[in-house]
Image (cartoon, grey):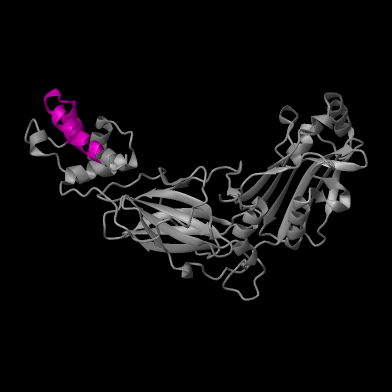
Amino acid sequence: MPTTPDPFDEFLRQLAPLMQSRKFPSLKKSPPLYESLELACVAARHGDEWILVSGKAVLKPVPCAPDPQLQKVAALQEIIALEGCLPASEFNDLVANLRHSWVLKQENVRLTAERARGYSWMAPAVIKSPAPKRCLRMGVIELSKDPDALLLSDADMVWDRPFALCGNGPNPLSLLSDRTLQNIDSQLRSSTPAFNGFDGLCAYLALPIRQRNLTSSFQVLAQLPAAFHLVGFEKHALEIYIECLGAPDLMVEWLPAHKLQRVPPDWISKPPSKHPTPTHYVSIAVPHYYAQAAKLILFFGELQAHAGTVALPIFGVHPKDGDPLLDLEEEPTVPDFATRELRNQEHPKLTYRSEIKRAILVLLTQNPRATDLEICRGLDADGVVELPDGWKKNREDRLFKEAYMDSKLRHKIEIQISKVRAEMRKLGIL
């Protein structure tokens, strides 16, 4: 019977390629990808030691301040709160401490009291943080004469899909009773610096715990510094701008054929000077075989940092300015590379000789919930496909919408659209 991998071992195994990589692969003297370890925690008194209530540690690709250290944000009789930035080299010591039910030995902060029930650690996974979702939109890509115009600094960048190892411990209610929390609230509001009670302190430290959900937890997070910034379409090619550090893999899955293309790693260019977070430009030709959409994926090893699907403007159907072009995934997943098909394997797909059916197929791919009337409006807006003679009441008729509104012609149009819908459902693409 297979054994469950140790969560810490699995976390370190999947993180190893990032820990060993350089921030800028093209520079021999580039620093390592991760340069700092931000830590924050709140602990409650238990005799002569402190027991963790909530905490997190975040590996980041930005350097620490000149004098990295932890500092006490609050130090009361019942609780202590610490935050600070340490060199990333301290990460292995932190993991060793967590394995043995410690958080910070130098401050006598433990995960649980001695001889108490231990922590429960979940399997590591890429998660979605509360950071705002990126929404890329179709439009004209205007490049400034300044080559650094599209770059963001590390301070401005939010990498909102970290690789996480999360643990939960005993309920801290035995350490923080209602009366104790009332005293803590009062003292924090009058302390220096002042906080709006226990909840305000935890919000300041960006910890998830609040009085209404008092549960012990600790998160170990590693930022995955790669994200799609802008996507355009020009001359049968996708023009992609990517903000990243390190050397993520870029892959494209062409739909509905589900053919996976790995982009050669030379798309990662030398970083511009004075900008720690470069924006890279990639142009990928749309394949000759039938493709309606492209799923763009950025990986670090086995870890998916960012992904989204682009509806390709084919058969004359183009997204309008301001419409979302890249539909980003809400919850990225960790792929199973033992079973993932990386070969260009043929999959069932729809190919029509009829221009009408091809245009209907594209419209349904872009909006699977489109009504028959909306499809007719889309055909009119595109203007590439002409109204068939059999759908005309008068010889000069040109509009699909007008034909659909005619009760004598509507059934013919409904039959054609229904056939495309049925074939798409049969192949599982609708």
Q: Which residue is located at x 85 percent, y 50 percent?
A: 71
215 or 63: nearer the eye?
215
Residue 123 rendering spot, x and y as whole percentages: 61, 47
Residue 264 falls left or right of residue 174: left
| Image quarter in which the C terminus is found | top left
Residue 16 placed where, x, y %?
62, 62
In the figure, 294 relative to 372: above or below?
below
User: Would you say 312 lies left or right of 164 here?
Assistant: left
Q: Is residue 74 visible?
A: no
Left or right: 156, with 367 as reference point: right
Which portion, as a residue range, is magenta?
399-423
Query: Can you give x and y, in whole percent of width and height, for residue 275 in the image?
Result: 62, 64
Q: Magenta part mainly helix, strand or loop?
A: helix
Q: Is residue 168 visible?
A: yes
In depth, the one of 57 and 274 nearer the eye is 57
Q: Is residue 272 above or below residue 296?
A: below
